[in-house]
Image (cartoon, rainbow, N blue to C red):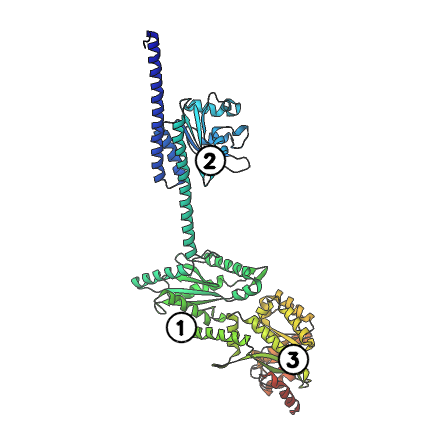
């Protein structure tokens, strides 16, 4: 077919135009491929999310030739705000100040907002002609586009964990930019960026989880102190350093004596509060080189990496002062009672776990009058093993009712009439024989067995009182209550239940609390004594004169009698000061309309002095040693027949 000259020129022109368009498409696709490749390279080397977003924007501009690029995150606040994380060609602060949104409102019609809201790319918006961008609300964006030199905008949604996190938005010079092939490649780039963000976040979550696991392995979550594992590792390193440099080190072990009782009576939450407050006190008292850890339920340890015995003693005295004051727990002021044991390298041990164990063993020899601390001496571990074994045996003895009820008579001094007895507990161990009461009472405190022991004692006393009543013996039995018993919210109900069970007159059951026990928690003691008094029982202050109670407080207590401690009564014949104290106490008791009982009446001379001083009741070896409760009736018969 032949063409005219004009037709030939037209065909030639159309051919050139198509070639130019094809070249433009190829160039755009090539740029998009270059951008995709460079973007993937950026993803591989990114270690931080913000760094990744910034580097990706740079790649898109430098490799793709785009005039504007930004990464925008969708905020899920009330306004559905847009937060520009990174950008080139548009100022983040400027565009955020315009307060655009991704909500389906007039201010949410931009390409970025549409891509986020719909989850689909918003392609080829012409800034100069698109109705959205020619609206007054978008005039600032249009002006910025003209100034920056881009005419078309496309936004791609960024999907992270199947949710649209935000959008990748680009601006190109040509109004007709972003053809189908280019958009396909850039969509892939956006998906890769979203994957990179997801991967980085997963990596950070994994690192955080690993850090959490490591922290759980080496730190105590309650006090945020290093734990036992961390302490042993640090201690072993310190021992190695001390060995290399030929110097000693010291380890202090602190045991919170009353924690078990607080957990049982006030609850574990209260015990946790106590530990947290004590941990804070200890942290504030640390020296620069000290290493503090929580190494047990109610136990802390302090490492002095280059300290000897003198340094350890000074540290123990400092810690004893720090931990001395009461702690407010559950609305109560609680005395934590802390025992501090000291063990030294190399004299006591050369291995971390043994040194810690021996510092712990030393706490069993702590005496408050000696400063509240003790240094390890040989044999303490063997004694700890024996005590541990006895704790198990004692628990079984309570459960199997293998304990023995003893009593010691009380006698009216003027008439010599028997006026009751103090109930006592004894333990005949099948291997070790009759154990000292003070020893197994301390075992009970350490093993958390005070409440079971008190329950056994109450059951035994009520049962014995009923047995005496059945044979015509109407004598009162007094039960000793400990400070631990005062915290027991079920104590009064249990006593009420026993009165109902045995139908015993309240006058036949009495209760004794030591003066020191009453002074530990005066408000709780007053409340408990008031409830006991309402039951019709008689109440005694035991060991009077040793607890530093004030007269004003003594007046408030609903007690019937005070028992002068034997440490004043026994030496009164030879010691005039003791005699003066006893005399003054008797006068004080009588002035307060209280009966006065003298403990430790072991000789006739002391009895005679008490007669002269007009004391009311005597108790001691002169009258009788403690005896099995079932022997009391025969003893009373013999006492009545004794000549005056």
Q: Secondary structure at mark 1?
A: loop
Distance, label 2 to label 1, CA atoms, is 69 Å
Q: Is residue 447 above or below residue 284?
A: below
Q: Are marks 1 and 3 in contact (CB under 8 Å)?
A: no
Q: Secondary structure at mark 2?
A: strand
Residue linked to disc 2: 166
> Which of label 2 and label 1 is nearer to you?
2
Residue 548: x and y, percent? 58, 70
Tell me where residue 587 sits by quadrant: bottom right
Answer yes or no: is residue 220 visible.
yes
Residue 225: x and y, percent? 44, 57
Residue sitting at x 68%, y 82% = 469
Front-most of residues 74 and 630:
74
Q: Are marks 2 and 1 in contact (CB under 8 Å)?
A: no
Residue sticking out furthest to the left: 244
| Residue 465's disc number | 3
Front-most of residues 212 and 16:
16
| Residue 377's disc number | 1
Distance, label 1 to label 3, CA atoms, is 47 Å
First along the sequence among labels 2 and 3: 2
Residue 124: x and y, percent? 44, 25
Q: Is residue 301 above or below residue 202?
A: below
Mark 1 Cα shell of 10 Å, populated few (<14), some (14-19), many (≥20): some
Distance, label 2 to label 3, CA atoms, is 82 Å
């Amino acid at each position: 077919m032949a063409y005219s000259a004009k037709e030939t020129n037209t065909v030639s022109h159309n051919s050139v135009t198509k070639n130019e368009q094809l070249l433009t498409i190829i160039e755009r696709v090539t740029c998009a491929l270059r951008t995709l490749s460079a973007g993937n390279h950026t993803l591989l080397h990114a270690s931080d999310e913000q760094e990744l977003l910034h580097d990706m924007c740079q790649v898109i501009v430098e490799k793709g030739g785009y005039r504007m690029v930004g990464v925008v995150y969708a905020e899920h606040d009330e306004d559905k705000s847009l937060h520009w994380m990174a950008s080139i060609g548009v100022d983040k602060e400027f565009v955020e100040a315009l307060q655009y949104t991704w909500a389906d409102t007039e201010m949410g019609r931009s390409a970025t907002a549409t891509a986020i809201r719909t989850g689909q790319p918003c392609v080829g918006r012409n800034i100069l002609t698109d109705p959205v961008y020619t609206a007054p609300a978008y005039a600032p964006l249009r002006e910025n586009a003209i100034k920056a030199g881009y005419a078309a905008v496309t936004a791609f949604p960024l999907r992270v964990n199947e949710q649209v996190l935000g959008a990748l938005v680009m601006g190109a010079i040509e109004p007709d930019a972003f053809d189908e092939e280019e958009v396909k490649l850039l969509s892939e780039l956006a998906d890769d960026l979203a994957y990179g963000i997801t991967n980085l976040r997963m990596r950070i979550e994994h690192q955080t989880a690993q850090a959490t696991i490591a922290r759980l392995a080496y730190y105590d979550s309650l006090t945020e102190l290093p734990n036992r594992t961390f302490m042993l590792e640090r201690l072993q390193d310190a021992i190695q350093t001390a060995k290399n440099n030929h110097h000693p080190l010291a380890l202090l072990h602190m045991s919170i004596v009353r924690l078990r009782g607080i957990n049982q009576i006030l609850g574990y939450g209260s015990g946790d509060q106590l530990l947290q407050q004590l941990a804070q006190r200890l942290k504030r008292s640390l020296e620069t080189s000290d290493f503090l850890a929580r190494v047990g339920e109610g136990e802390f340890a302090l490492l002095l990496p280059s300290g000897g015995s003198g340094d350890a003693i000074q540290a123990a005295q400092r810690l004893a002062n720090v931990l001395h004051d009461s702690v407010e727990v559950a609305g109560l002021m609680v005395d934590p009672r802390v025992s501090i044991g000291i063990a030294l390298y190399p004299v006591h041990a050369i291995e971390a776990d043994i040194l810690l164990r021996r510092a712990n063993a030393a706490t069993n020899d702590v005496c408050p009058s000696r400063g509240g601390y003790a240094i390890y001496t040989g044999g303490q571990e063997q004694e700890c093993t024996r005590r541990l074994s006895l704790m198990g045996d004692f628990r079984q003895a309570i459960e199997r009712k293998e304990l023995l009820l003893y009593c010691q008579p009380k006698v009216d001094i003027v008439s010599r009439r028997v006026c009751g007895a103090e109930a006592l507990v004894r333990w005949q161990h099948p291997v070790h024989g009759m154990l000292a009461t003070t020893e197994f009472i301390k075992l009970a405190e350490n093993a958390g067995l005070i409440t079971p022991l008190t329950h056994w004692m109450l059951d035994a006393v009520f049962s014995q009182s009923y047995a005496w009543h059945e044979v015509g013996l109407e004598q009162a039995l007094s039960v000793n209550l400990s400070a631990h018993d005062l915290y027991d919210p079920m104590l009064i109900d249990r006593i009420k239940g026993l009165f109902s069970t045995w139908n015993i007159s309240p006058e036949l059951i009495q209760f004794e609390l030591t003066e020191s026990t009453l002074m530990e928690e005066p408000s709780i003691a007053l409340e408990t004594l008031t409830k006991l008094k309402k039951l019709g029982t008689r109440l005694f202050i035991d060991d009077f004169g040793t607890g530093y109670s004030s007269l004003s407080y003594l007046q408030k207590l609903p007690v019937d009698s005070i028992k002068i401690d034997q440490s004043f009564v026994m030496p009164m014949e030879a010691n005039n000061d003791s005699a003066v104290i006893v005399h003054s106490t008797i006068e004080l008791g009588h002035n307060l309309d209280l009966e006065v009982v003298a403990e430790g009446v072991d000789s006739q001379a002391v009895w005679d002095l008490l007669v002269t001083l007009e004391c009311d009741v005597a108790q001691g070896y002169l009258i009788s040693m403690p005896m099995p409760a079932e022997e009391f009736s025969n003893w009373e018969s013999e006492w009545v027949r004794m000549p005056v």
